[in-house]
Image: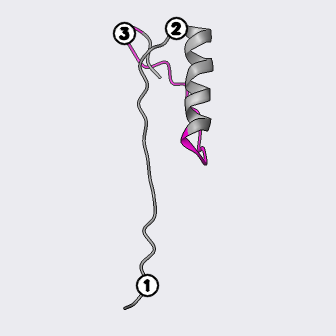
């Protein structure tokens, strides 16, 4: 999360669903008025032999 000039350092931690991190962002923004979020996603591809 970021304030006006620099990152505040707050992190949501690992979330299992986008709605969880969106709720965390909403609460953080209400409490701090920080409006900029960097989001990082990761996923797995499971391949099976033909």
Q: What range of the chain is rendered magenta?
A: 4-18
Q: Residue at x 60, y 44 (%)?
A: 15
Could you tell me which secondary element the residue under label 1 belongs to?
loop
Relative placement, left or right, of 46 versus 20 is: left
- Estimate the spatial distance between the alpha carbons at disc 2 and disc 3, rounded to whole Å: 13 Å
Dot 1 or dot 3: first in sequence order is: 3
Q: Residue at x 62, y 37 (%)?
A: 20
Q: Observer-nearest residue: 28 or 11?
A: 28
**What percent of the width, then of the height, locates residue 43?**
45, 58
Q: Residue at x 43, y 25 (%)?
A: 37
**What percent of the width, then of the height, locates residue 12?**
58, 33
Q: Residues within 10 Å of mark 2 (few under 14, many from 20)?
A: few
> Quarter holding the C terminus?
bottom left
Query: In the image, which disc is placed on residue 2?
Result: none
Could you tell me which secondary element the residue under label 2 belongs to?
loop
Name the residue tied to disc 3: 5
Q: Is residue 6 magenta?
A: yes
Dot 1 or dot 2: first in sequence order is: 2
- Estimate the spatial distance between the alpha carbons at disc 1 and disc 3, rounded to whole Å: 47 Å
Name the residue tied to disc 1: 48
- Res 26 → quadrant: top right
Could you tell me which secondary element the residue under label 3 belongs to?
loop
Relative placement, left or right, of 44 versus 16 is: left
Q: Nearer the viewer, mark 1 or mark 2?
A: 1
Q: Residues within 10 Å of mark 1 (few under 14, many from 20)?
A: few
């Amino acid at each position: 999360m970021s304030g006006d000039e620099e990152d505040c350092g707050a992190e949501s931690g690992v979330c299992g669903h986008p709605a969880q991190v969106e709720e965390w962002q909403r609460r953080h923004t209400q409490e701090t008025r920080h409006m900029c979020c960097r989001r990082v996603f990761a996923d797995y591809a499971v391949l099976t032999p033909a």
